[in-house]
Each structure stands twice: as C-alpha cells, then as structure tokens.
Amino acid sequence: MYKVLVANRDEYDTKGIEWLLKSSMNAWDVESAEDEAGLIKKLETFQPDLLIFELDLIKEDRYSSFLKTIQIIGPDLIALTMEATFAQAKRAIDMGVADLILKPISADILLKSARNIQRRQKLKAPAAEKSSSIKADKNFNYQDIFLEAKDPAEPFLSIGIKTENVLELPILYEFLESYAFQKRVDYFILSGMVLIIAEKSGISWKEESVKFMRNWQETSPEPIAISINTGQEGQNTLKSHYDANRKLMELTFFRGFNQVIEEASLPKWLSIDPFLTPEEQSSWIDFLNQADLEEIKSWFSKEFLILEDPYPEPGLIRIRLTSILAQIRRHMKTFRLADGEMEKEYLRLFQTILYSPLIYRIINEMISFISYVFETIRSDKKLKLDLTDRVQFFIETNYWDASITLERAAEYADRNPNYISSMLAKKCGKSFRELLNETRIRQSAKLLLESEMSIKEISSVCGFRNQQYFNKVFSKIKGIPPNQFRKSLHKTSF
C-alpha cells in the first residue's frame, strides 16, 4: 500500500488534498496532519512514502527536528508555497524536495506530480517487491501465452489493454505496477498490449476497467482501449485468452480507442475483395483526372467510414487502400511527381496504411495527401505537361470511355483537332485513334492475364462498343485473337 501524508496550514486545503488523492487513487492510504506538531508525530507513526506539506508550516525552532525525521523515514517530498521566491526555492532544495508547487494548487498538477514520484519509487524497488500481482503464485508464465497448456487452467477472466501508440506501452505497464485493482491480478507486457489475468467472480470487471481508464486519463493524454474476455467455451488456457483479446482489440480499427470492449462473442469478419474492380479503377481515374476532391471524400466515406458489424477484415481493408494508393501513384507519375518531397510523403502514407491503428486516421491522411497532389499540380508551372503528354494523359485516363474522340482530346488540350492530329503524326508517328487503340489493347491484355472476366466484359470496360471490333483490333496489334492470347498465357504459367 502506498502511503501519503498531507500537512497544510489551512485545514480546508488539507482536507481538499486528502479527498482529491483518496478519490483519484483508491489504492493509496492517505492521512493528514493539521499542524507542525501533528506532522512530526504522524511522520513517526504513519511513516509515509510521500509527504505533501506546506513549506511555511515548519517553524525555525522545529526545522532541525523535522529534517532528522524525514532523513530517517525517507519519504519523497512535495512542497507547497504561496511565494515564488528564490528563498523558498532554496529552502525546498535544501530539504531534498522532489517538486515545489505554487498555491493555489492545481489538482491536475498535484496528481501528476504525486503519481510520477510514486512510479519512480516503484522503479527503484527490488523486482520481488514491485509486483502486487499473483505472479508470486507462479500460476502462469510468458510461455503459456504462446503454447497450449497440457493441463487446462481453472476458469479465469482476461483483460487486454492497448495504447494507440505502441511506444507508450512501457509507460502503461509502469502505471499498472502502481495501480491496485480490487482483486489481485497477474499481468504480462507484450508487443501489442498488456494482458491481465483475473478471477472471474466477486466484482464487476467492466466497472473496474472503466475506473482504471478514468485514472489513466488523468495522468496521460495517450488513448487506450480495454478488452474483456470472460472465456467462451474451450477458452480455458492463457493462449486462447490472449488470442481472443487480440481479436477483440482489432475492433478498435473501426471503433476507435477510449472505450471498453466486452463482446458476447468474438468478431466474425466480413469477406471482401481487397482489389479495385475495373469499374472502380475507372471511377478513380476520373476522380483524379478531374481533381474532384469532394467526390473522393464521398467515396471514402461510403466505402470505409459508414461500416457496421460484421466489419470487413482489417487486413483486407489495408490491401484495398493500397490498391487505391497505386492509382494515385500512376497519377503522380503522369505529372512527374514521384520524387523528392512528394515521394517521401507518398512512402509515409504507405506506412500509415499498413500500420495505423485507426481506419478514420488512414482516410484523413489519404485525403490530405490527394489534396496535396492536386494543389501541387495546379500551382507548380514546371509540372505542366507539353501538348503530346497532355493528349496521352487524356487517353490513359479516359480509354475506358467508348465515346471519347479526337475533338474531346483537343478540347482537353485546348488546341484545334487538326493541329492535334498533325502534332501526333510528327512526334509519335501515329494518329489519335491508333494511340487510343494501343492503350485499350494494353489494358485488355492485362485483364486477360490477371482477371477471370469474360472477353466480352473486357472489351466493354476497355472502351470498345462491340466484341467483334475488339477482336479485330486486338488481333491486329497482338498478332492473335484475345481468346488465343489468354490460352497461351495460361499455358506459359504452368
């Protein structure tokens, strides 16, 4: 039990601090002293771990006696003063005070200081004295988390605690070591969470978890999530409980942190196709080509932010987001943006998609990056394409549209159609229609290889009005009809 003694000249302040500590830290034993004589007596009888006292409470004639007492008992010290003077600061330093707090007292500052001092004291304590858990009973070992036990353990309850930022886990573990639940627990720090093992009966562990979260929030801005697994049928080993808590914690990807997750059953993920369909690819090409940020936001919201249980499997969601990122990268390359600072931001976004613990944060980062790409294209004159590149960009981003014409390309490039034809013949040695058909056939060949779509469907999504014309153009460019092309590719792959 961590013992705290409070001594202040103002009785009202003393009782206020005592109440604050008792209500915030239920595991602490807090007492108070009303005057200087009572303080020294309480120091000898109560022997606190932490003394919170007003500097001016100690008179000169008792100063020596006070110093000897605290040197013998050795509590940590938090001093309070109404005077922010050098003399008061020097006096506090001479006493070995850990913190000097100016009155009127801020509850947040006082609590934070007291908890930090208590944690430091815990770190200095021998390992055998540190843990108030049931590890001394040797019921569980770390190896039990990863290996199925031969003999199932008695029924128990498990609690997972996860920080949004995994680097904060050691701080969470320190906080746990200074925290006392109503019943003793066993806890293990792991790479993604802290796992707690507790008795099933006696108290409401959901209420206890909510109380723990509230106490944590008073000391740290880091969001946490808590999962409670009561143990379904067949979950009577530490490994099964660990696996169950990991699955429950995956719900935070959609639901966020600062909540207690207690489900009657484990999540059952919805199976989805993680790759964009040809129609979705066409939509994204159009979004990017038109720099339509509002339509992109709407698409993201419908696809990823308005989701209900059963949720899609988070890993498949991440793959789907990387498919979208690939579309964005093609757009960047068209405008020669795939280098320098833009490339760094792109790689950072890729890491965010892979590892961010929250779906809404990934979407916000993607929207921000797309906006950055659009703004760079609009503002940087060096990125403007020459006329040939603009026409080819128009073809690459609109080949799927069966209605595109030379006139529409000329309108996009802001030039006369006859001038466009002359320029393409001079620089590319080909007509607009030839360049368009080559692009369509290149995309159709990719679909023949990578998809199970029928040839009729492929011809349609690649911009051909009928399959017969598609077969004719494909045979002319590739030398064989599309059905033979697909068969030859399948033979080669086996």
Image (spheres, rainbow, N blue to C red):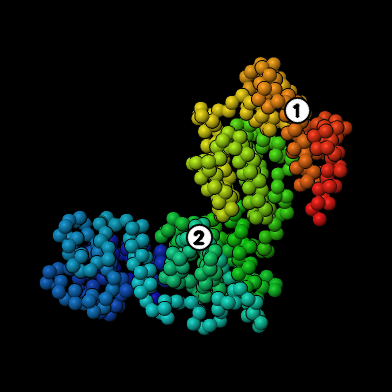
Front one among 431 and 99 = 431
Residue 176, can we see it? yes
Q: Amino acid at mark 2?
A: Val
How far is disc 2 from disc 1 in space, using C-alphas? Answer: 55 Å
Q: Which residue is mark 1?
A: 434
- The quadrant in which the N terminus is found is bottom left
Q: Residue at x 59, y 26 (%)?
A: 386
Q: Is 317 on the left or on the right of 445, as rendered?
A: left
* Residue tagged 2: 166
Quarter residue 247 falls in: bottom right
Q: Secondary structure at mark 2?
A: helix
Question: Residue 492, image x and y in percent?
Answer: 81, 51
Residue 87: percent from left, percent from top: 15, 60
Q: Residue at x 63, y 76 (%)?
A: 147
Q: Picture coordinates of residue 44 (x, y %)?
A: 25, 79
Q: Few, some or many C-alpha atoms within 10 Å of disc 2 (few <14, some 14-19, many ≥20)?
A: few
Identify the residue shown where x is 49% and y is 57%. 165
In this image, 52 relative to 312: left or right? Answer: left
